[in-house]
Image: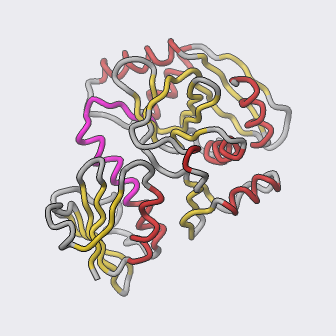
Amino acid sequence: MIQRVVFGKTGWSIDLAGCEEIATELPDVFVGWDVSIGTTKEFRNHQPRAKVTRQKDGWHWREIGAAKPRHWDRTPPKSAMRVMTDIHDVAIYWYLDENPHLLCLHGGAVKIGKGLICFPARGFSGKSTLIANLAFLGHKVFSDDVLGLEVKGSRGMSLGFLPRLRTPLPPNSAPSVVSYIKAHRGPNSHGWLYLKPDRPQIARFSETSKITAIMILERVEEGELALEEVNTAAVLKNLIAENIIRKIPMPEIFDRLHGLASDCQRFRLRYSNALEAAEFLAKQFA
């Protein structure tokens, strides 16, 4: 059986052959993309960009005018979760290819109070877990992994995806947060899960908000929570390192990121417990 997935906000479509479990769960992952699923006859006016087919050795991807996810040929997915995360990732690159003016930051962002607190990605800093804790406290998630940056002004744009968490969760996770994540667990397998909070807590595709602070995270094994201000240069270094766009001339990228770093509050947060850190940030920026 072939099902056609249409991403209404962009007009893209992908054909899925023998992938019923993916077709069932994929629309939940794309928040605000207006995803529809039907037969090729129902959506005959939508020419697919790719076709994903389930075979004995895993899932296979055939390009039809658009690039496939990186590494797909070398390690074809063996789980439906991996297929969904790859479609998630490739949709980001398709969108950025069609919107070359948009800068994009590898990092998370959560709306607390009137603006976004942005967390540039750093390895093993606990970004996704901290964001899950902020969602538990009722704050709106704009990004768990990739945040669009508008051309003018210090505004972040949601690309409309559920947050992804590594599992198992850290051993010092609060029982209440663990229960929350279990109750709001979306597609999951092989050490990853999508967190599926109530819809108002996830910003829809293309929703924007002003970035009020940039927070460099430093997770430690133990010790008291500490928040310190950092200078523009320290934040700019992180923003440049985590910028995933290379098509815009580097001087323009530098100017735009320098403007963002200059306009926002700038901090480094050292913490060991995610819920304690989330509660602190919620109080600090309310």
Instruction: Identify the image's colour scheme: rainbow, by chain, secondary structure or one colour.
Output: secondary structure
Q: In which quarter of the image is the C terminus?
A: top right
Q: In this view, does 258 lie above or below 46?
A: above
**Residue drawn at x 46%, y 67% as measured from the top left:** 25
Q: In this view, does 80 lie above or below 170?
A: below
Q: Is residue 101 magenta?
A: yes
Q: Is the magenta stretch mostly helix, strand or loop?
A: helix
Image position of 5 (left or right of 156): left
Q: Give the range drawn in magenta.
A: 87-105
Image position of 119 (left or right of 260): right
Image position of 189 (left or right of 154): right
Residue extending farthest to the front is 42
**Residue drawn at x 68%, y 43% as measured from the top left:** 130
**Residue drawn at x 14%, y 62% as measured from the top left:** 45
Image position of 191 (left or right of 73): right
Q: Give how far across and how far down residue 47 sits, in percent.
A: 16, 62
> Considering depth in this image, is 171 or 160 the residue closer to the camera?
160
Q: Quadrant of the N terminus?
A: bottom left
Q: Give how far across and how far down residue 183 sits, in percent.
A: 69, 62
Q: Is residue 268 magenta?
A: no
Q: Give how far across and how far down residue 275 sits, in percent.
A: 77, 42
> Considering depth in this image, is 205 or 60 the residue closer to the camera?
205
**Residue drawn at x 52%, y 52% as measured from the top left:** 162
Displayed quadrant of residue 157: top left
> Considering depth in this image, is 197 or 131 the residue closer to the camera?
197
